[in-house]
């Protein structure tokens, strides 16, 4: 079945996907994206059937611009209404406040932002924008959330507090305001970025799947959700895979292609942290650093490599 991104069916489904993301929480919804990518790419490698990846993982059910974006918006709105403590909290389902009689608008907000995220992606994809249009949808949707639903009206880039850190790019000694305090030091970012980049690039070359590393990285966040601190790496894995496949397809030997994957993995890790320090750390809603790194580096791969 071939359904256009602009088909009304997809818009209706996107509302449902955003609402579902609001119900279960943004990060749990994204973990489901990872599960479905893994399942879909196993099917693709076995049979060249990409319907699960295309229509479920990256369709209106679990596409991050829909379900994750809906969860981000719902958390911000619930915090604005005083129903939950933090608008940045993407681990906790907003339905923790579901017993309240006036909770249902939180779910509707999730559905509306599911449609917004889908609309951004659909229009950019239809006109052939050379980037990851789903990642753009995640990022721009979150900017809109910050602009209209910020509980503390912190503004798009947040309010820098010089008493906490001397510059917007800085962090206090305890790194308490960092996006990922346990994964914010340059040496860790470089080491993990290179390692995951190499692994993801190699996995994509041997399987032919551009997103298998992304799926594994996204699913690994189940441990962040349930066990606590661990690296976030999907913005490392995806650009690494795309870059490795691009240069390998252009005739570069596999050793060189895997090294290119490692380089792009490092770039993804550092770009994600830079974005967090500019947009995420000083605000009170979630603006997705991985989405930013993914669409910037995907654009580089498509236009340069």
Image (spheres, rainbow, N blue to C red):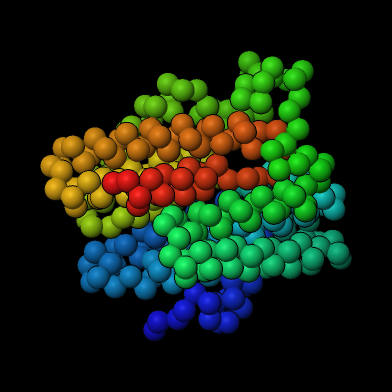
Which residue is painted at 59% across and 35% down in the image? 276
- Asked if residue 71 can be seen in this view, the reply is yes
- Asked if residue 212 can be seen in this view, the reply is no
Q: Nearer the viewer, residue 75 or 252?
A: 252
Q: Position of residue 121 (x, y in %)?
A: 53, 64
Q: Position of residue 16 (x, y in %)?
A: 62, 72
Q: Nearer the viewer, residue 92 or 285?
A: 285
In terms of image quadrants, where is residue 113?
bottom right
Q: Where 44 falls versus 172 (above or below)? A: below
Q: Nearer the viewer, residue 184 or 32?
A: 184
In terms of image quadrants, where is residue 69?
bottom right
User: Seen in the image, is 176 located left or right of residue 97?
Assistant: left
Q: Where 240 falls versus 53 (above or below)? A: above
Q: Position of residue 291 (x, y in %)?
A: 51, 48
Say how many tags the image has. Answer: 0
Which residue is painted at 24% across and 64% down in the image? 45
User: Seen in the image, is 234 located left or right of residue 148?
Assistant: left
- Quarter of the image for the N terminus: give it: bottom left
Q: Position of residue 192 (x, y in %)?
A: 38, 31
Q: Where 118 falls versus 203 (above or below)? A: below
User: Seen in the image, is 40 located left or right of residue 9?
Assistant: left
Q: Where 9 falls versus 189 (above or below)? A: below
Which residue is painted at 84% across and 61% down in the image? 100
Which residue is painted at 56% across and 36% down in the image? 275
């Amino acid at each position: 079945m071939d359904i256009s991104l602009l088909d009304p069916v997809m818009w209706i489904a996107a509302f449902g996907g955003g609402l579902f993301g609001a119900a279960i929480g943004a990060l749990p919804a994204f973990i489901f994206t990872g599960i479905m990518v893994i399942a879909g790419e196993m099917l693709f490698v076995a049979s060249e059937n990409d319907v699960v990846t295309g229509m479920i993982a990256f369709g209106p059910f679990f596409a991050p611009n829909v379900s994750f974006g809906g969860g981000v918006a719902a958390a911000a709105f619930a915090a604005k209404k005083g129903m939950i403590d933090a608008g940045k909290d993407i681990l906790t389902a907003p339905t923790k406040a579901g017993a309240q009689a006036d909770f249902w608008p939180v779910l509707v907000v999730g559905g509306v932002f599911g449609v917004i995220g889908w609309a951004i992606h659909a229009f950019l994809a239809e006109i052939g924008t050379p980037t990851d249009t789903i990642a753009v949808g995640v990022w721009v949707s979150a900017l809109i959330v910050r602009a209209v639903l910020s509980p503390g009206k912190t503004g798009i880039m947040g309010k820098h507090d010089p008493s906490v850190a001397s510059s917007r790019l800085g962090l206090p000694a305890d790194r308490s305001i960092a996006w990922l305090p346990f994964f914010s030091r340059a040496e860790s970012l470089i080491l993990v970025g290179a390692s995951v980049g190499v692994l993801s690039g190699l996995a994509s070359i041997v399987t032919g799947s551009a997103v298998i590393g992304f799926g594994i990285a996204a699913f690994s966040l189940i441990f962040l959700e349930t066990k606590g601190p661990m690296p976030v790496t999907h913005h490392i894995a995806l650009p690494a895979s795309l870059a490795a496949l691009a240069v390998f397809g252009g005739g570069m030997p596999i050793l060189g292609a895997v090294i290119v994957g490692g380089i792009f993995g490092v770039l993804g890790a550092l770009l994600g942290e830079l974005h967090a320090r500019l947009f995420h750390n000083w605000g009170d809603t979630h603006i997705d650093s991985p989405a930013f790194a993914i669409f910037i580096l995907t654009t580089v791969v498509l236009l340069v490599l």
